[in-house]
Amino acid sequence: MASRFHRLPLKGLTVFEAAARHGRFTAAAGELLMTQAGVSHHISQLEAELGVDLFVRRSRGVELTSAGAAFLETVEQGLKTLSDGVASARRQAGRKTLTILTDYGFAAWWLMPRLTTLGELLPGVEVQIATTQASIDTTDADFDVAIMFGDGDWSSFHTTPLFAEEVYPVCAPSYLAGRAAPQTPAEIAALRLLHLRPVARDRWYTWAEWFNAHGVAADVGSQDLTFENFQLVLQAALLGQGVCIGWAPLIDDLVAGGGLVRLAAEPLRSARGYHIVEHTNRAYAANVAKLKAWLLEQRAAARRAGVVLPVAAVGQ
């Protein structure tokens, strides 16, 4: 006899996951293009099948019961496994795709300008770019290769160092118009600073760490601006809104093209950096190998070129 779990409708499980994630049947209905009554009906059917209450209904939303919270873990894992199975089946059916996972900054400022070259490298392959600001773990299976920033410690994955963390203070030439370029960290501290809000301790350099490394005490000023992602930080800098910490290689093209200028001759370095992160059992290994070789060649080419980014001149 089939178990009760095996008879549970997939639609009901999907509705349950959305309702649990949103904490409101109305929000889940909007995501799934259903009515609130339809969501409530699916949840009631699921609770009847399981014989337990999954939610506590309140006037301003719903909360998972202890049984609901435990069931959610199983449902999330099951839906994830199903999604991975569909992706694998599509690959085996001949859909040649290569999914690259990286963060917003690397995707926008380094990878996007090189997509034409990447397309020439992998003819007939659909390259998909996925972005995240979170770390990855063994539950992240929706990528073929990742380019992630960190210390290189990703268990269950194979990692190869790509670019070490090197940072410089940078700004747009327009921000320096009519004033001398700052020559010391103390002078930089007096400018409007553009901050990237850290998502975790020691994830990347902050202004406080940059000033501390140069022996300068600097507090966040009332004129400073803080942003949630590096793409917004760079856009603010390019618009002449202030000075930001710039990460190589993300800023290299912008500095070389004159959109940004460096305010320090030597970079601040750490043991962190961008790494190539690979699954150990991913299909289309030949395409992953081509991508990896291309990335390492890009790194080698930059080293051979001995790229020296210009520094803002006094009186600029």
Image (cartoon, grey):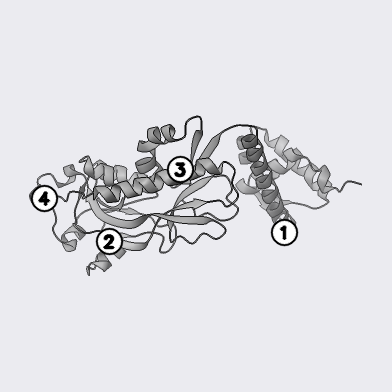
Q: Secondary structure at mark 2?
A: strand
Q: Nearer the viewer, mark 1 or mark 2?
A: 2
- Looking at the rendered structure, which numbered label has been put on residue 66? 1
Between 280 and 65, which is closer to the camera in this rendering? 280
Please tell me which of labels 4 and 2 falls first in the chain: 2
Residue hosting label 3:
291
The residue carrying pointer 1 sits among few (fewer than 14), some (14 to 19) or many (20 or more) residues within 10 Å by Cα, namely few
The residue carrying pointer 2 sits among few (fewer than 14), some (14 to 19) or many (20 or more) residues within 10 Å by Cα, namely some
The quarter of the displayed image where residue 203 is located: bottom left
Disc 4 and disc 3 in contact, CB within 8 angstroms:
no
Please tell me which of labels 1 and 4 falls first in the chain: 1
Please say whether residue 140 is visible from this viewpoint: yes
Please tell me which of labels 3 and 2 falls first in the chain: 2
Q: Position of residue 230 (x, y in %)?
A: 36, 48
Q: Identity of the amino acid at label 4?
A: Ala
Q: Secondary structure at mark 4?
A: loop
Residue at 72% across, 59% down: 66
Please say whether residue 104 is visible from this viewpoint: no
Residue 247 left/right relative to 261:
right
Q: Position of residue 63 (x, y in %)?
A: 67, 52
Please tell me which of labels 3 and 1 falls first in the chain: 1
The quarter of the displayed image where residue 46 is located: top right
Q: Position of residue 76 (x, y in %)?
A: 67, 49
Q: Nearer the viewer, mark 1 or mark 4?
A: 4
Q: Secondary structure at mark 3?
A: helix
